[in-house]
Amino acid sequence: MLSIFRQFDGWSLLDVALLSLIIYNILILMRGTRAAQMMSGVVLVVGTFILANVLPLSTLRWVMNKFYSSFIIILVIIFQDDIRIVLRRMGFRSKMLQSEQELSDSLIRDLVDSASSLSKHRLGGLIVFERTIVLSHYIEGGVSLDAKISEKIISSIFNLKSPIHDGAIIIQSGRIAAAACFLPLAKDPSLEPTLGTRHRAAIGITQETDAIALVISEVTGQLSIAFEGKLHKNLSSDECSSFLFEHLQAQIGLPQRAGRALNMFGRGRP
């Protein structure tokens, strides 16, 4: 036993620490994907392969050795969508833009007031906030605006008579970058079947990126926030403001409202 500890030097400690860090970050990136849900199946296959090589199970060993050569290819085919999501999540910006300092208290309040106004008039809407993963792919597919954030502009965009009321608006660098942006829909079979397209799109974009999506229901007028692939429903305007203050200002170094939003969502709100 002592000989083992003598061989464990500083380089070995660094080696183990780096490997642990890599595995930890891979698990974080996989969170919310199908791969995370199916990991138990992958672990079972790997465990069976190890068991077949340790124990004298010649038939099982022969089958697993034949299967092992194609195992990686099979995983890539099965998890191709999830691999794309993980790789996209790894595409962080190298540097935050200076103009993101414009995402101030007043702008966040204007956005929440706009959402509340849409809610009162039963106008559906979807507002997506870009964070560290650039949403240029979705912006390019919409109608480019580069407009100042205001309640009048947002209300006019989501007015039913507007030709661009379908889809989402994306907030980038403190401005409305584009409207009528179509987002990937969440395909999780465990989602409520009553969820509409807007809510599924909000969940979908937060599964593929680290964006935050604010949804206004056209049917009920309820405000909801999608974050990290989870939908938090029936929030008040104050709760929406607290969450946006906490997460959007944290990324650009502005003063945080310590713990308010985290505590709110930590209570397991449905």
Image (cartoon, rainbow, N blue to C red):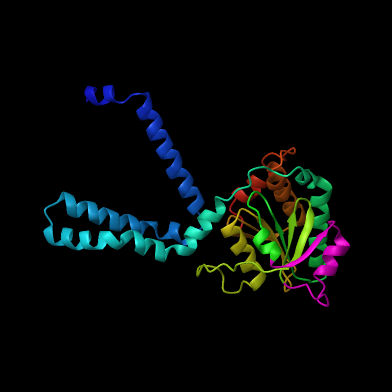
User: Relative to 157, is 2 above or below?
Assistant: above
Horizontal and vertical percent position of residue 48: 24, 56
- Quadrant where the N terminus is found in the figure: top left
| Closer-to-camera residue (24/188) | 24
Horizontal and vertical percent position of residue 82: 48, 60
Q: Is residue 150 magenta?
A: yes
User: Relative to 49, is 198 above or below?
Assistant: below
| Closer-to-camera residue (214/62) | 62
Identify which residue is drawn at 16% across, 61% down. 62
Q: Residue furthest right?
A: 152
- Quadrant where the C terminus is found in the figure: bottom right
- In which quarter of the view is residue 178 placed? bottom right
Q: Is residue 89 magenta?
A: no
- In which quarter of the view is residue 208 placed? bottom right
Identify which residue is drawn at 76% across, 52% down. 238
Horizontal and vertical percent position of residue 80: 45, 63
* Left or right, residue 206 beside residue 221: left
What's drawn in magenta, residue-wise? 141-166
* Left or right, residue 140 beside residue 86: right
Identify which residue is drawn at 51% across, 60% down. 84
Horizontal and vertical percent position of residue 220: 73, 71
Q: How many marks?
A: 0
